[in-house]
Amino acid sequence: MKRVAAVALLALAGCATTAPSPPPSAVPTFDAAARVAAVRAAGASVASEVDVQPLQDPQVADLREQARRDEQAGRLPEAAAALDRALAERPADPVLLQELAELALLQHRPDAAFDFARRSHAVGPAVGPLCRRPLEMLVQVERLRAASGDVAAAARADAFGRERDACTLKPPPRY
């Protein structure tokens, strides 16, 4: 009797199938908050460097503050909507474009983050924190792409990293 039960059990075991593994996603899981923190850290101002900042519009400043509060409260779509309204007022503002890039990455939209960062860098200063932040975003997105199998992305990330490092420019000495 035990042999019959064992044979039946083995026969049933042969019928079992393993669940298929889920298809790999185009974008691997990543810690968006950590990547955005790295971007913001790269944009920290250094006391002994040239720091170029665009003029601020009071209406845009209010919308940026609203977006900051929404982001801190975890309301990312509302934060993005506030920045979109601000961008409608100042479509070539590198700060707004960069903040939209960071929100896009927090929303796990790396392609949008890349596009906003690229635009921010194109219209922003060539030195200082506002130069480093978009380039660090490009580095982070390219590293993410490399992790998902894009073999050329690591080289692009390295190139953006070198460009980011060149953004730090010390002011001329004053005598």
Image (spheres, rainbow, N blue to C red):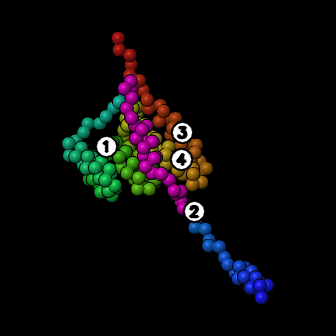
Q: Amino acid at mark 3?
A: Ala
Q: Amino acid at mark 4?
A: Arg
Q: Amino acid at mark 2?
A: Pro
Which residue is most to the top?
A: 175
**Which comes before the other along the chain, label 1 or label 3?**
1
Which residue position is annotated with label 1? 93
Cβ atoms under marks 4 and 2 closer than 8 Å: no
Marks 4/2: CA–CA distance: 17 Å
Residue 41, magenta (yes or no): yes
Marks 1/3: CA–CA distance: 25 Å
Which residue position is annotated with label 3? 159
Residue 35: image location, x then y, percent: 46, 46
Q: Nearer the viewer, mark 3 or mark 2?
A: 2
User: What kind of element bears circle 2?
Assistant: loop
| Residue at horizontal 77 percent and vertical 88 percent from the top | 1
**Which comes before the other along the chain, label 3 or label 4?**
4
